Image: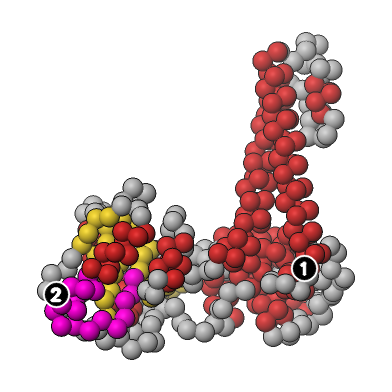
């Protein structure tokens, strides 16, 4: 796989038109390095892609008018809220497009610094030109997924958001009951709405009418959320049953055979990390944000903890899986390694070692789905769908 930290293609600046785009909600600022043109042109555009493409083609005609033969057009922008639809659209029109990892752009560290779209395009242009020249770690590019790859991630991400909303509503209902002084009653069950009229405060009073209405509304929203979660899960299982050999479904079913891993975790790991073309096991750990962040300067040596610069969904899921691994994969080599390391350790050491276990589990699963190498002592089960 090509390392996205640097470019390995030969870069001829005389025949390459380089453009960077500063994207915003209401307008775009396009800046270019046009061969044969001394100035560095910029053009403020609307958010219509055809207008952007037309401006790039006008700059190409301007370079050819200056007797420069353009054989390559490169465009780049920071990956962000707009996603990757623009990159896919420009690629369909014959333009080489890259999405820059926003955190890889070096910025001045002054407490107060000028920040404008014009300065941002200058910064992006310097980063892109250095990357095209092959300078290692000048900036990093992000893999541009296909529309199908992005769509495959939506069910798990939607479920994550809805589950978080479910937790918020449950806590809200519990808080309301607490200030009324009503304890020992669960209003999160299916027949909770029937119990509301029978509940009494410690003084024997019924729930006040406005508070009663609020609780009814919260429970109605909670019922709707539970219905939506069930629909998402059933739709995913139906799709796996209907097309078990299509796309990434074989990998999901393969992971679901590991004891302690369900369909949700398997789906998240496959679509968020295991189908990415990562270079080696070190890149896998870095992408999940499960590697350290040492600070070394002169005689000073200290560890700052986890980098946390990777995919937060993968990191949180792996930390939860690590605890489940100790229960469901207790005879595996990884579980025995963990128990051996914490035999005489304190609580803080156990917390650090569970992170190390999560990283080892991720690397083991990555090798399992990419090369077929089964982790030592891994317990399997039939995939339940």
How many badges with numbers are in the image? 2
Q: Where is residue 6 in the image (x, y as percent from the top left)?
A: 39, 81
Residue 174, image quadrant: top right
State the residue position of label 1: 243
In the rendered view, would you say 130 is above or below 162?
below
Q: Which of 111 and 269 is in front in this view?
A: 269
Disc on res. 357: none
Query: How would you rate the neighbour count of disc 2 (Cα within 10 Å): few for under 14, some for 14-19, many for 20 or more?
Result: some
Q: Where is residue 338 in the image (x, y as percent from the top left)?
A: 72, 73
Q: Which residue is drawn at 15% across and 83% down?
A: 67
Going by the image, does 344 lie left or right of 275? right
Evaluate whether residue 157 shows in this view: yes
Q: Where is residue 151 in the image (x, y as percent from the top left)?
A: 60, 60
Query: How would you rate the neighbour count of disc 1 (Cα within 10 Å): few for under 14, some for 14-19, many for 20 or more?
Result: few
Q: Residue 283 lies in magenta, yes or no?
A: no
Q: What range is drawn magenta here?
A: 59-75
Furthest toward the bottom, the residue is 10
Furthest toward the right, the residue is 382
Q: Residue at x 60, y 65 (%)?
A: 148
Furthest toward the left, the residue is 38
Evaluate whether residue 361 shows in this view: no
Q: Which of 54 and 10 is in front in this view?
A: 54
Q: Which residue is drawn at 46% across and 82% down?
A: 3
The image's colour scheme reads: secondary structure
State the residue position of label 2: 37
Going by the image, does 342 lie left or right of 300? right
Q: Measure the alpha-carbon separation of dots 1 and 2.
A: 55 Å
């Amino acid at each position: 796989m090509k390392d996205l930290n640097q470019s390995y293609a030969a870069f001829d600046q005389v025949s390459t038109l380089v453009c960077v785009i500063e994207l915003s909600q209401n307008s775009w600022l396009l800046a270019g390095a046009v061969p044969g043109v001394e100035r560095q042109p910029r053009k403020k555009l609307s958010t219509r892609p055809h207008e952007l493409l037309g401006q790039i083609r006008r700059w190409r005609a301007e370079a050819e008018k200056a007797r420069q033969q353009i054989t390559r057009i490169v465009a780049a922008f920071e990956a962000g809220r707009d996603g990757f639809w623009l990159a896919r659209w420009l690629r369909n029109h014959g333009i080489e497009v890259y999405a820059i990892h926003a955190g890889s752009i070096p910025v001045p560290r002054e407490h107060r610094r000028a920040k404008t779209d014009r300065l941002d395009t200058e910064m992006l242009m310097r980063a892109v030109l250095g990357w095209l020249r092959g300078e290692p770690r000048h900036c990093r590019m992000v893999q541009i997924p296909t529309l199908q790859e992005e769509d495959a991630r939506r069910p798990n991400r939607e479920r994550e958001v809805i589950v978080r909303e479910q937790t918020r509503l449950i806590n809200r209902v519990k808080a309301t009951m607490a200030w009324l002084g009503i304890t020992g009653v669960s209003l999160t069950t299916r027949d909770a709405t029937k119990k509301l009229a029978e509940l009494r405060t410690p003084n024997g009073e019924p729930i006040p009418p406005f508070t009663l209405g609020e609780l009814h509304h919260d429970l109605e929203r909670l019922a709707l959320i539970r219905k939506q979660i069930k629909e998402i899960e059933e739709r995913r299982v139906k799709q796996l049953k209907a097309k078990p050999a299509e796309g990434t479904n074989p990998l999901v079913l393969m992971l679901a055979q590991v004891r302690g891993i369900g369909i949700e975790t398997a789906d998240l790991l496959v679509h968020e990390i295991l189908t990415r073309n990562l270079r080696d096991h070190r890149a896998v750990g870095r992408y999940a944000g499960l590697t350290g962040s040492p600070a070394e300067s002169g005689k000073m040596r200290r560890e700052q903890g986890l980098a946390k610069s990777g995919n937060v969904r993968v990191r949180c899921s792996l930390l939860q899986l690590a605890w489940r691994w100790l229960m469901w994969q207790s005879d595996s080599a990884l579980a025995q390694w963990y128990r051996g390391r914490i035999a005489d350790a304190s609580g803080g050491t156990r917390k650090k070692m569970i992170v190390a276990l999560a990283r080892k589990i991720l690397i083991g699963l990555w090798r399992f789905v990419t090369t077929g190498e089964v982790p030592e002592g891994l317990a399997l089960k039939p995939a339940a769908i």
